[in-house]
Image (tube, coloured by chain):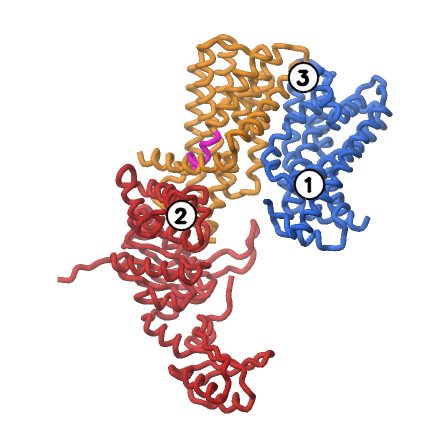
Amino acid sequence: MRTLLIGCWYQLLVLRRSPADLMALFVVPVNTTVFLAIMQHADRPDLAGHAVLAPGLMALWAISLVTCGELIDAERWGGTLEALVAVPARMLPLLTGRIVVVVTASLFAFVESYFVALVFFDVSISVPHLGVFVVSMLATGLAMACWAGVMASVFVLARSARIFQNALGFPFFVLGGVIVPVSYLPDWLRPLTNVVFLSWSSDLLRDALNPAPVQDFGFRLLVLLLLALAGGGLGAYLLSAVLRRVRSLGTLTYA
Amino acid sequence: MHFIRVFQAGTLNAFADFAATYTVRTWTFAWLGRIIAQVVFFTLIGTLLGSPEQQRFLLVGAAVMAIVGEVLFACASSTWERRAGTLPLLVASPGSLLAVFAGRSIQWVPSSLATSSVCLLCVGPLFGVTWSVPSALLLVVVLFVTAATTYCFALVPGAAVLNAMDLRNIVANVIGALITAFCGAVVPVSFWPSWIGWAVNALPVTHGLRAVRELASGGFDVLPHLGYAVLTAAIWLVVAGWLLRRLAERGRRDGTIEFGD
Amino acid sequence: MIKQVAPAVEVTALRRVFAGGKGLRKRGPEHVALDGVDLVVDAGEVHGLLGPNGAGKTTLCKILSTVLLPSGGMAKVLGHDVVTHTAQVRTSMGIVFGGERGLYGRLTARQNLKFWGALHGLHGKQLRTRVDALLDRVGLRDRADDRVEAFSRGMKQRVHLARGMVGDPALLLLDEPTTGMDPVAAKDFRALVGELRAERRTVLITTHDMVEAEQVCDRVSLIDSGRILATESPNALSEWITRFERVDALVPPELVSRLRTLPGVGSVSTSDDGRTRFETTEEGVAAQLVRSLVEAGVTTVTTSKPSLEEVYLHVFGGNGMAVRR
């Protein structure tokens, strides 16, 4: 627990030094404007919730992808990874602490888009199912943190993955149904969207904004948590692979 | 003439960087794939709205915005020049800074021309945006003019971030998002208050997008739009040159032009 | 009748003051980088600017190369004022940095030269001929089409030199050109500078290496704290180098006290590991010391040349020690 807090503290220091890491937060108000304008222009006030949630989900994903994905790699470039591995504190809680801070900071995006809707579009988003919303949001943050851990390790293990990092945004915004629910996608994509945790998150969060009762909440939350667990397990496994490589080769330089 | 030759020399670096960033495979799967996903993302909002017309409108808008996003990489590639430590040598040489920087980031123009062409000509027909052969040919010309003129605009933030290099990505992304919101890509410009409509007329891409929409709707009256795009681009180019000269002059005064290491 | 030729560099009472502190609120104390520098470099001369880090060498180079404005005084390059006539100055001057920066790593050596040649208004056949000739000259013909990022430090420095020469400049500014080079590469580089002298080009070279200054320069100006302390011939430097030699050895204490009294032996200090350092103040004393040590049975003896700081200490009395920012 102590190590986890150290990780949190360290990441807060890093973020204070380089707010550019949270770049997506600067774009959130404009993205909210884009989506709300589309809905208003089409005279569909019922879709305002979609428009307000989407920029937040996109920011959450983008920040996790860029920042967390580079956490380990930046340490490697800075030459501090070996030192980190050498300290007695365990790597997993340290990294977890850092990822938790990044994900928490990016949740601020939802606050931003809520106020943009209120101030510039006079759209007040109400949350009829507050409990569902809060629980889903927490589960989403958890799942994001777990999968960010996967990415952090993948970017170290497979150097070429970095070039695809930039490409991992929009395909997942489509498959994760961040604005258009995945039910609008062709059926053959269903197996794929089912394992993208973002699709369960966005559906749950949207349903929480809808006055109609939320169907199958327990089951859907369970799936989301299972996907988070899968990501966490995979992330922990990959991290141990990274550390094994550091220890056996003495370094992380790429072959 | 000297300006053109320096510009050409500057493109050496642009293409060397491009070749170092992408292979044919990574450009096709990573970059083009990403742009197609981005265009599909916006197009699907039209599906959500249940309107084929909205689908087509958003597809065309998003495809042209792909150009904006990519040429704004000029912000990043301009800072690569300063990171190479060449700024003092450039300032102390008889060549034009504007010519160097205009050549430096040119790689994004052909790349964005390719991605936007694929989106409109190959992805477009899947969502009902169809082209005759003449309109398709003219489309490529229009997209080229749009990319080139938008690039002239992108040199302005590119020059501005040379003094605040940490902000290069934030500046590029926020400007890109603002253009997407207000230049007629997702909703008609008329949706916004009239002063915004006036303001976005200063941007070449607003006119380039109008020309693409004209072609997409079966018309061929693109020349006036392209004329405005070129005219506004020329003004932005002058602004970029002024900013670069000011960067050099200010650097001479306050000693911020690094020398050696 | 004697034809009057303008000096290549003419600097009078040159001052540069930087605002203190960083960021928007520059409230720290002002920093005087150049404090009334007077300097004349004649056409065709290889002139060294010798001083410790932070002495003001680079600031002077920046002003001469038009990337920094002086706070006061006057500087002319080939008769052109560096503040008002930048265009003329820029066409007639080449700059060479030490270190890795200032080159395009992803371009080949040839492409680098072509780029800078184009900036100097060259094109077509003239550009190709000039670039080929320079590549030959700096011995990079065989590696001309390799990317510069793969080059060794010494090879990069040759590209730098060729780059500085591409505009056929009458004056070349070399700012610490051999920093970080291995001794062999540095020696080759100095030979190239020697060729420049033969072509009657003017070279202003900054360095903190006395041996380098002695080897390549016609005259050397010693600079510290933003002031020129003296302008000397390389002979004076070589005399200092031999006068202020150092002898290090493991010496029994009684022998130390005997040698301490020899004429020409300056300071004597013994470090924790028992090694004693003798510093000489007269030529020939080092050799005499070594003989006495060997006769007394001490065989592990090292002699070394004095550092620039030590010479400053001896000659100018402690002005040149601290590295300032």
Which residue is disc 2 drawn over?
Answer: B89
At a point 52% along the width and 88% down the height, the residue shown is C256
Q: Which hue is chain A drawn in?
A: blue
Question: Which amino acid does the dot numbered 1 rest on?
Answer: Ser
Tags 1 and 3 on a common chain: yes
Residue B176, visible in the rendered structure:
yes
Which disc, if any, is residue A165?
Answer: none
Q: Main secondary structure of the magenta part?
A: helix
Q: Nearer the viewer, residue C155 or C82?
A: C155
Same chain shared by disc 2 and disc 1: no
Q: Earlier in the sequence, mark 1 or mark 3?
A: 3
The chain displayed red equals: C
Residue under mark 2: which chain is it in? Answer: B
Which chain: orange?
B
Q: Amino acid at mark 3?
A: Gln
> Circle 1 marks a residue in which chain?
A
Residue drawn at (44%, 85%), measured in percent from left and top? C289
Residue visible at 32% across and 36% down? B2
Mark 1 — residue?
Answer: A153
| Mark 3 residue crowding within 10 angstroms, few (<14) / some (14–19) / many (20+) | some
Which sits in the foreground, C216 or B183? C216
